[in-house]
Amino acid sequence: MTNTEEQLTPVPTRARIIYRAALARDAADQAEVFYHAVMQGAAAHYTLDERRAWANALPREGSAWAVRQALYTTLVATCDGRCVGFLEVDLDAGRIETLYVWPSLAGRGIGTTLLVHAERMLLEQGLGRVEIEASSMLYERLTRRGWENHGEQWVERSGESLKRYRLSKALNAVET
């Protein structure tokens, strides 16, 4: 094989996702992941006005997300050193506060893996149940994974009413 042939042969590459605790340097990426997950990722489930109101509920500034890192245990999924997904968990309350993944990477297991890590942390805290208030988009995925629906809720953001669902799941030491 010549050098030219080697250069033209596609080399399969797979981006490696690394999961870890959030660092202050991830905050600006978190802001962007949140914004794009809402504005693009939730487009099939919410109107443009609803998504704008939702996206404006939290500042699109890294400093605001760095403050949230101090309030909640935050796990991130990174690719090439950039945050592409994150989850905030309140370990004392047994609640997932937020879960967002970059829209073009949705459906690839990143959110599920973040949830698995959070569930393990909650189990280590001695908790037997986890709760979340999930968007219509996340609701479908979570109920397929065995989360129990406790009903619809409506939350107001900048004059828009957004539907979400109260869900919970029993935590087990071994997933089946």
Image (cartoon, rainbow, N blue to C red):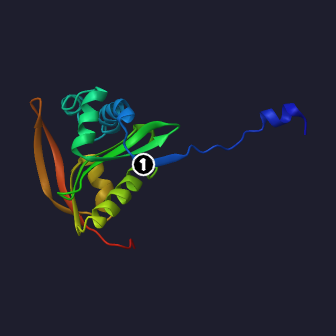
Instruction: Indicate whether 163 appears above or below 27.
Output: below
User: Looking at this view, is 66 or 78 the one in front?
Assistant: 66
In the picture, measured across the screen, residue 41 lies left or right of residue 164, that is: right
How far across and down, in percent of the image, does residue 171 sit?
28, 69
Q: Which residue is mark 1?
A: 20
Quadrant of the frame with the N terminus: top right
How far across and down, in percent of the image, does residue 124 sit?
30, 66
Q: Residue at x 34, y 63 (%)?
A: 120
Q: Residue at x 71, y 41 (%)?
A: 11
Quadrant of the frame with the C terminus: bottom left
Q: Amino acid at mark 1?
A: Arg
Quarter of the figure with residue 174:
bottom left
How far across and down, in percent of the image, does residue 72 sit?
24, 46
- Label 1: how many Cα within 10 Å (few below 14, some 14–19, many 20+): some
Instruction: Indicate whether 147 appears above or below 133.
Output: below
Tag 1, which secondary structure? strand
User: Looking at this view, is 7 or 107 the one in front?
Assistant: 7
